[in-house]
Amino acid sequence: MLLKDFYQVVNSSKEADLYISKLKIEKDHMIYQGHFPGRPVTPGVVLMQLFKEEAERRTGKKLRLNRADNVKFISVFDPTQNSELILETTIEDTGDFIKLNGVAKSAEGVVMKINSLYVAS
């Protein structure tokens, strides 16, 4: 985990090809002291890291981001309003690459969508 104590996996399941993970985000994590004081917003790069770590957890491989296409930040995730974040992903291991398509959701709706490609490092 890149950001120590930033989140914990509360629940994890698989339905057909879809992996679903419920994360509890630590609203008092030090990252929010600077982003932004009084109005915490989860940085986009941190959301991207959550998907990478999810792919690593699901494949059992240490991964490096090779390419991220079609990354869309749709709404702000403020952990003081709701500390639960749901990651829904499809992960395909081609042997050479790990392909991930994912959606991050909060109680308020979709936060982010990503299509990414990783290589084992």
Image: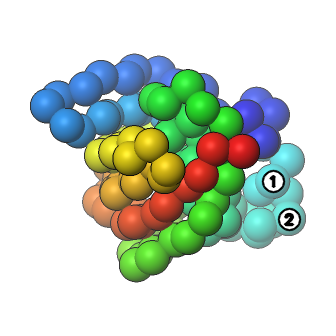
Q: Is residue 80 above or below residue 5?
A: below
Which mark identifies residue 31? 1
Q: Quadrant of residue 63?
A: top right
Q: Quadrant of residue 93?
A: top left
Q: Residue 90 appears at what percent x and percent y?
A: 30, 46
For numbered disc 1, what is the local secondary structure?
helix
Q: Amino acid at mark 2?
A: Gly
Q: Is residue 103 above or below residue 15?
A: below
Which mark identifies residue 73? none
Q: Residue 89 appears at what percent x and percent y?
A: 33, 46
Q: Residue at x 40, y 78 (%)?
A: 70
Does 63 sit left or right of 111 as displayed?
right
The answer to whether one can see residue 105 in this image is yes
Does 22 sit left or right of 56 as displayed?
left
Q: Looking at the image, which is closer to me, 121 or 34?
A: 121
Q: Looking at the image, which is closer to me, 35 or 43?
A: 43
Labels 1 & 2 near each other (Cβ < 8 A): yes
Q: Quadrant location of the C terminus?
A: top right
Q: Residue at x 60, y 32 (%)?
A: 61
Instruction: Say few, some or many: other residues with alpha carbon within 10 Å of mark 1 (under 14 / 14 to 19 / 20 or more).
Output: some
Seen as rendered, the residue at the extreme front is 95
Q: Residue at x 73, y 34 (%)?
A: 1
The answer to whether one can see residue 26 in this image is no
* Separation (CA) of disc 1 from disc 2: 6 Å
Q: Residue 100 appears at what percent x and percent y?
A: 40, 53
Q: Residue at x 81, y 53 (%)?
A: 31
Q: Amino acid at mark 1?
A: Ile
Q: Identify the residue under disc 2.
A: 34
For numbered disc 2, what is the local secondary structure?
helix
Protein image colouring:
rainbow
Instruction: Say few, some or many: other residues with alpha carbon within 10 Å of mark 2 (under 14 / 14 to 19 / 20 or more).
Output: few
